[in-house]
Amino acid sequence: AQKITQTQPGMFVQEKEAVTLDCTYDTSDPSYGLFWYKQPSSGEMIFLIYQGSYDQQNATEGRYSLNFQKARKSANLVISASQLGDSAMYFCAMREGFTDKLIFGTGTRLQVFP
Amino acid sequence: NAGVTQTPKFQVLKTGQSMTLQCAQDMNHNSMYWYRQDPGMGLRLIYYSASEGTTDKGEVPNGYNVSRLNKREFSLRLESAAPSQTSVYFCATKGQAGYSNQPQHFGDGTRLSIL
């Protein structure tokens, strides 16, 4: 069974609008962490935001926020005020327990148009 | 990404050839990782090293070997390359094993094609 599911292969959003990228996860470990990475067309992986399973508040980093719904096992990335430079692949990843292994989803390709 | 350097950036091999992918970091990080990225499959962990002198298998270790040469360097070796190993390979580092909220920092990748 997939541990991390990103059901949106592609998303389009107009510049300056907000967009939500979905991520659901599956784990029985009460301790886990969720990460979002951005991969532009140039190929590098850029860390965006982190949410721990015991964190009381949703994580925010500038224009990025994480809509963490623990009971529904979802950790959706919200990008506010989209910019053309936000066009990229976005990956959700999970760390289970206290291991250092990351499990990645298959990614969502976001395209921002003027 | 000046912190994590992968060499080479591109390589074409013939089936059966051997090859070592190099990764070096100047971030003074303890943990290092090797991933492969295939179309439509996200990144999958091949091997990782929590600290100098230790290595462990990840999700897809078959056909690969690794060496943690020192704190800075972590190499990935394909002893007998197969077309199924055509992929983009990423090296990543993290400050300290077991610290839950630290992200992994990635190199720019090595695009490897095996004919």
Image (cartoon, coloured by chain):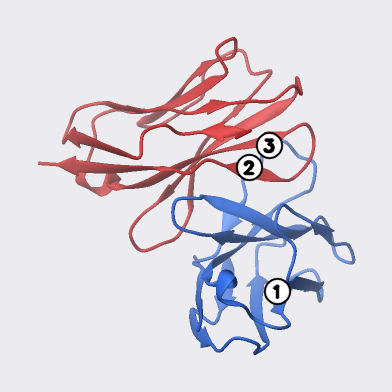
Chain colours: A red, B blue
Camera-nearest residue between B95 and A39: A39
Residue visible at 69% across and 18% down? A54
The residue labelled by disc 1 is B76
To the question of a shared chain for discs 2 and 1, the answer is no
Look at the numbered discs 2 and 3 and tell me whether their residues touch, using CB distance below 8 Å.
Answer: yes
The local secondary structure at tag 3 comes to strand
The local secondary structure at tag 1 comes to strand
* Residue B2, position as x, y percentages in the image: 52, 69
The residue labelled by disc 3 is A95
- Left or right of residue B67: residue B77: left
Marks 2/1: CA distance?
20 Å
* Residue B77, position as x, y percentages in the image: 72, 78
Look at the numbered discs 3 and 1 and tell me whether their residues touch, using CB distance below 8 Å.
Answer: no
Marks 2/3: CA distance?
7 Å
- Left or right of residue B66: residue A15: left
Q: Which mark is residue A34?
A: none
To the question of a shared chain for discs 3 and 1, the answer is no
Q: Chain of mark 1?
A: B
- Left or right of residue A42: residue B102: right
Question: Which amino acid lies under the numbered mark 3 shown in the image of this protein?
Answer: Arg
* Residue A67, position as x, y percentages in the image: 46, 19
The residue lying furthest to the top in this view is A71
Residue visible at 41% across and 31% down? A7
Residue visible at 81% across and 76% down? B69
The residue labelled by disc 2 is A103
- Left or right of residue A45: residue B99: right
